[in-house]
Each structure stands twice: as structure tokens, then as C-alpha cells.
Amino acid sequence: MPEHRHRIRVRYVESDQMGLAHHSAYVAWLEEARIEWLRTIGQSYRELEADGVLMPVIELGLTYKQSFRFDDEIALLTTAEVLGRTRVAFTTRFMLASQDEVRAEGRVVIAAVNREGRPQRIPAALVTILAS
Amino acid sequence: MPEHRHRIRVRYVESDQMGLAHHSAYVAWLEEARIEWLRTIGQSYRELEADGVLMPVIELGLTYKQSFRFDDEIALLTTAEVLGRTRVAFTTRFMLASQDEVRAEGRVVIAAVNREGRPQRIPAALVTILAS
Amino acid sequence: MPEHRHRIRVRYVESDQMGLAHHSAYVAWLEEARIEWLRTIGQSYRELEADGVLMPVIELGLTYKQSFRFDDEIALLTTAEVLGRTRVAFTTRFMLASQDEVRAEGRVVIAAVNREGRPQRIPAALVTILAS
Amino acid sequence: MPEHRHRIRVRYVESDQMGLAHHSAYVAWLEEARIEWLRTIGQSYRELEADGVLMPVIELGLTYKQSFRFDDEIALLTTAEVLGRTRVAFTTRFMLASQDEVRAEGRVVIAAVNREGRPQRIPAALVTILAS
């Protein structure tokens, strides 16, 4: 499974009074990277939800080694791993788009659930791609 | 209609690299003040929505005179005005909780709509209180 | 002065339980559009700040006609107007990137100030471009 | 070290189109709980920063078992643990204010650094209280 590369630029609103990108902003970036990753493999997360496949986050981990600042362009490199029938883990490295040094790492586990919040299988087409 | 007073404290995440509360944070504070205001008159906005009365914002205005900072305690003083059958305006003055000087002012117009987004009357009980 | 066009895509985190892009998200989008607009004319807002030219928002207005949803691609069309020596107004129309209908409009007035918060002139180079 | 209890109420802006409190909101709540916890032991985080003691987050972990919704009142129960001379871990359980069931758990490691980002000792007064 090749790594997915996504770029974001730190918004001003995401800066804090330390002059750094606030640590909560990374959570939204992980989500954006995940959704763009799905788009590149032909899966619209909007349509998945419309079809009754919801993917709430059930686990989140982040380690921050070096900070980012407003206006930095960040490359997010994401890989996915199928965890059984109902869960997927996404692991992401954050680096400046212009450099190779990993500044932060994140891992998110999502669970496929239906509209009532009960676990359901990840759609087969998605598993095939993720597990390839 | 007496003014409703609500207090919030500026979160760290709401600070920006200028060292000020970011101008977008005021929008969330206005919303919180509005919802707490409804609560004090016995109207849960959660229940209003569950009953099919949605209240999206259709107009927003803010003027910023003096800034706030992380950890400041802010008093929001809000009054409401019924604008016809389907709209309400909320006007809010922002000041430090410990002072009387108005540092910012906001005005939000909300429209009552149903789940399909069509205008509907504001519930009579609510109008009665708002117009009193 | 030609209009500046910027595109954003509504993030999942920007959706709310009405299923719409929350009205506060537009404020961050306006900011991003403004900063990208400056970049296209050769002005890095990061560098302006580093040089001691801060540009806090002193006025904000938004009208919401039709809503956006998660995953919508939005085109923001922005024009600028110099208001005296220390202020600039940015006016933005929001539309779906694939359509021509204006769904929301925003206007932001920013004031150039120094690090102590005192008004200062907008840099001449910037005025020249903005007023051209 | 007794547990610190802090309450927050889920803001509307923190809801998402699944109808749940978005998973990124917990990060801001953890921060608020931590700062209020410091306040109760007589340490203003604003003053710590003004004195040159910055406390960026270097590690974040969250597990989400049961979700929260807009308007829920959440109790955050936080304990702290000193990790050597320059780090503190804060562990938090999230539950509905009206119930005893833990719905989510979070852990944040912060590092004391100076304005240049170099590690520095946590102030002795703070260590004494945290380690008691």
C-alpha cells in the first residue's frame, strides 16, 4: 500500500500565543489527510456517510517533536492498516513540505459503524484497496 | 426584556500569535451566550432542534475595539429582538468581567427553519418571552 | 484591481449537527483567502508581521444566504479597498466552485498596527498594489 | 495528589454532522482542564508564560468509548504525574457530569521549555504540589 501524501498550510487561526501551530490543529489535519486519501482511491467519505457507513475516531495518538508555525507548508504522509473487519488505523508523519525531517507523528483508529452507532464491516471495496 | 449576562474565559487554543484572542473565537462565544440565554428562559436549544426548530445564523456582524487575551474573563451582555415571525436578532456587548468598558460588539440574526431548511414561525412561547 | 480567487474545501470538523458548514468556519476561510491574496501580490503576511506590521481585524460582517456542506469546494472571490492610511477592507463572495451563485458574502476591515497596537501606515508597496 | 474535577459543556460549534462532539474538541477541553487545575493550586498559566515558563504539549493520547453530544455537561477528572525535571503528564477521564461511567480517556505530556524552546526545570513550587 503506497503512502499517501497530502499538503496543508498552517492557518493563522491555528497559531497560538507561543507562536506555534496549536497542538489541536494536527487533529483536523489528520482528518483532512484521511479524507483526501480516501478520495484518491475513489472513495468519497461524504458518500460513504450518505450510504450509512460512519467512521468515528475511537483512538488518537500524537507525538510532537518539532513544532510548526503559521504559514508553514506541511506534508502529511499517511499509511493505512486494516484491523479486523470493522477498524482501520491510519498512521501519519508530519514534515515541512520542503524537508525530510519528521516533526510529528500521528495515529488514528477509526471504527465503521452504522447510523445507530453499531459496528459494521468496512465496505469490501475499501478493505481490498487498504489491504493491497 | 432584561439583558442576559454570560461569562466565558478565553481558552489557550483561542489565542493567536499576535497574543490576542483570535477574532473568530467571538463567533463561538456569541453562540454559547445565545444558547445559555435560551436556557435561562426555559428553552433548551437541543430540544428545540429535536422538535424540528433549527436556528441557523443568517447574518453576523462584529466590531472589535479593544482586544482580549488568553485567560481573560469576558462578560457577554445580550439582548434579543423579534424581527417578524421567523427571525430573531441577538445583540451582544463584550467586556472584561471586571470592567465596564465595551471592547467589542456583535449582532447575529437567526432564522427559524424546519429540517428541510424552509422558514417556519418561531415557537409562540419563545416569541412571548423575547417580545416581553 | 482584479478579484482574487481562492478555493477551500469544507473540512469535516467544520460541519455541525445541522449537517452544514458552521457559520464560524467562514471567518477562518476569509482569513485564509486574504493571506493567499497577499501572497499572490508578493506579500507574505508572515514577513509583514515579522517586520512589525500587524493586521488585526477590527470589523467583520457576514451574510449567509445558502449553506455549504462538508466536502463542498468553495470559491472565495475577494476584492480589496484602501480606507485611508491605516485600514483596508476585503470583500468576499462565496460560491460553490462549480457554480456561479453567490451563497454568502463577507467583509472584513483590518487595521495596520505596530507591536504595541498603535495604528501605523499600511506599507506603501501594499497600498500601491491595493489601490491600483 | 487528589483528582481535579472540571466541567465543560459541549458547544454547538463542537458538534459535527454525525451529531457528536467532534473528536478534536476533547483536545481543547483537556487544555482547559489542565489550566483550571493549575489555577486551583495557585498557578496562573498566563503568569507562568509571562515568567518565561512555556509548557507545550509533546504527547497526546485519547481513547473514545462512548460519544458526547452538543449541550452535554462533561466532567473531566484529571491527575498529574511528574516525569523527571522537565515533564509532567496529565491523565483525564471524561464522563457525563450526571453519571459515573467513563466515556473517554486522555493523556497529555507537557514539557517545560524557555522562550527559545529549550527544556527547563518545572518551577519547584509546582513540582512540590504535583508530587505531593
Image: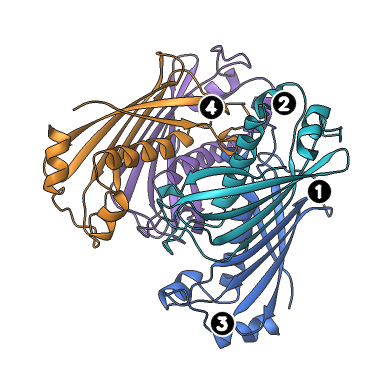
Chain colours: A orange, B blue, C cyan, D purple
How many numbered dots are placed on residues in this image? 4
Q: Are marks 1 and 2 on the same chain?
A: no
Work out whether B112 lies above or below B36: below
Task: Give the quarter of the image for residue D44.
Answer: top right
The one of A14 and A130 positioned closer to us in this rendering: A130
Instruction: Say which mark, if any, is on residue C48.
Output: 2
Amino acid residing under circle 4: Ile
Disc 3 sits on a residue from what chain?
Answer: B
Q: Is residue D120 left or right of residue A128?
A: right
Vertically, is D116 above or below C49? above
Query: For the residues marked 4 and 1, what is the alpha-carbon distance in whole angstroms?
Result: 40 Å
Residue beneath disc 1: B65
Residue A6's disc number: none
Q: Chain of mark 4?
A: D
Residue at mark 1 to residue at mark 2: CA–CA distance = 22 Å
Amino acid type at circle 2 is: Leu
Residue that carries the numbered disc 4 in the rendered image = D129
Q: Which residue lies under the disc numbered 3? A: B122
Q: Are marks 3 and 2 in contact (CB under 8 Å)?
A: no
Residue type at the position of mark 3: Ile
Residue located at (67% from left, 26% from top): C42
Q: Are marks 4 and 2 on the same chain?
A: no
Q: Nearer the viewer, mark 4 or mark 3?
A: 3
Q: B67 or B1: which is nearer to us? A: B67
Chain at numbered mark 1: B
Alpha carbons under labels 4 and 2: distance apart: 43 Å
Looking at the rendered structure, whether the residues under marks 3 and 2 are on a common chain is answered as: no
CA–CA distance in space, label 1 to label 3:
33 Å
Residue A13's spot in the image, x, y percent? Answer: 59, 39
